[in-house]
Amino acid sequence: MLQTQFIRANRDFIVERLKVKNFDASSIIDEVISLDETRRSTQAELDNTLASSNKLSKEIGILFKNGEQQKANILKEKTSALKASEKELSVKLRETQEHLNNLLYNIPNIPNALVPAGNNEEDNDEVFKEGDVPTLHECALPHWELAKKYDIIDFELGNKITGAGFPVYKGKGARLQRALISYFLDKNAAAGYLEVQPPHLVNEASGFGTGQLPDKEGQMYHVTEDNLYLIPTAEVPVTNFMRDELLNEKDFPICYTAYTPCFRREAGSYGAHVRGLNRLHQFDKVEIVRFEHPDNSYKALDGMVEHVKNILRDLKLPYRILRLCGGDLSFTSALTYDFEVFSTAQDRWLEISSVSNFENYQANRLKLRFKGADGKKQLAHTLNGSALALPRVLAGILENYQTPEGIKIPDCLVPYTGFEYIN
């Protein structure tokens, strides 16, 4: 959430930069500035009314003490009028603040200067590519056919139990899934991330804190009776660890990693491009989350990108990195790099990670501040990334490592799986 003082001081800059996200902010920004002026004037009027009321109360006490009851009663009538005015102003201030907050929640984060203009994923900038695409044997299959052939993932059984997008992993498929989770967590822990196990449901305040609410409300599974939401990613509960916290400058960086299942409604997702593991309603993901001093957040972002690179190098999967354009950038992100693995059997790129810097946008929603060396309070910066999302990594391994003898397991995973082939 953007700060109102920043909006007041940078109106034209904000409007211009948000055009990169294809968001026309002019009217909502002007309304925010107008409401903030109303809030300020109402607060000033309320403060003056309270001060006058307190002053009269002291005078009334002195008059009663001196036996001047008639004068005291006259002043009491004035205080009654002031109290009525105080009540009206308090209601006006609360309603104005609520309206202002609702508007602020609906303004996206400002994209970093590196973010290119564009409308959709076709306009993203490829900034890095590494790894050789393997040449598959002539009977090579897409992963959903391989899953059926080797009986390692049962999409029909998941559909029977729950519905489409909820697969059942079996035998070596389940063990490979578990191996990937353990491998990712170990890599992250070795890089300095503290492993945590957060809840898989969050309250409404947590959803607002990271920006899933109100922007992605329709994409989250909602437990209506308890007003809780199934998490779309570990980013939500882990980032909310720091909600309403005041840190010290020396606390940075704070780094967490977490494995969780993730739940997304993915409304309107149909077609061949979402077959098999390409898009699911429930999937596993290992996340990394960082809380940083503003001066270090972009250096930290570069470090996160290098960290994910190293994992993919270990897996020996061909991948590329995209800098997302404004039209493909999330509501809350200032800068995002997407990692994509090449699926040889499908002849297409599959997104397997997003690494983002939110600058102080989430921190303002979270009320996450730190005390600098000068004693002044500032908003922290938050970052997060997938390291990694399992379904498409698994799809990439199944397809790129398939041989006539079976599916070879990447060398780095063999200590975790206990087997070298699925056959």
Image: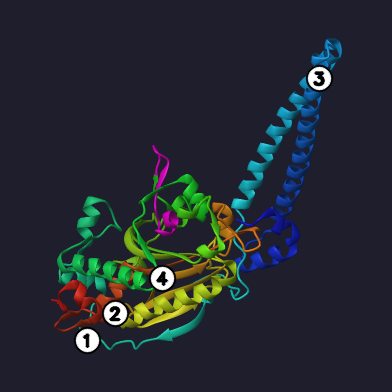
User: What kind of residue is marked 3?
Assistant: Ile
User: For residue 353, which numbered disc appears in the image?
Assistant: 4
Task: Say whether residue 394 is visible.
Answer: yes
Circle nearer the N terminus (1, 4): 1
Q: CA distance from mark 3 to mark 2?
A: 89 Å
For the N terminus, the image quarter is bottom right
User: What kind of residue is marked 2?
Assistant: Ala
Residue numbers of the magenta segment? 223-238
Tell me where residue 239 appears, x and y as whole percent.
46, 57
Q: CA distance from mark 1 to mark 4?
A: 30 Å
Q: Nearer the viewer, residue 3 or 392?
A: 3
Tell me where residue 404 appears, x and y as whole percent.
16, 84
- Residue at 62% x, 56% y: name it: 107
Q: Which residue is mark 1?
A: 138
Q: CA distance from mark 2 to mark 1?
A: 10 Å
Q: Nearer the viewer, residue 5 or 58?
A: 58
81 lies above or below 394: above
Say which element carries label 2. Answer: loop
Q: Which residue is mark 3?
A: 62
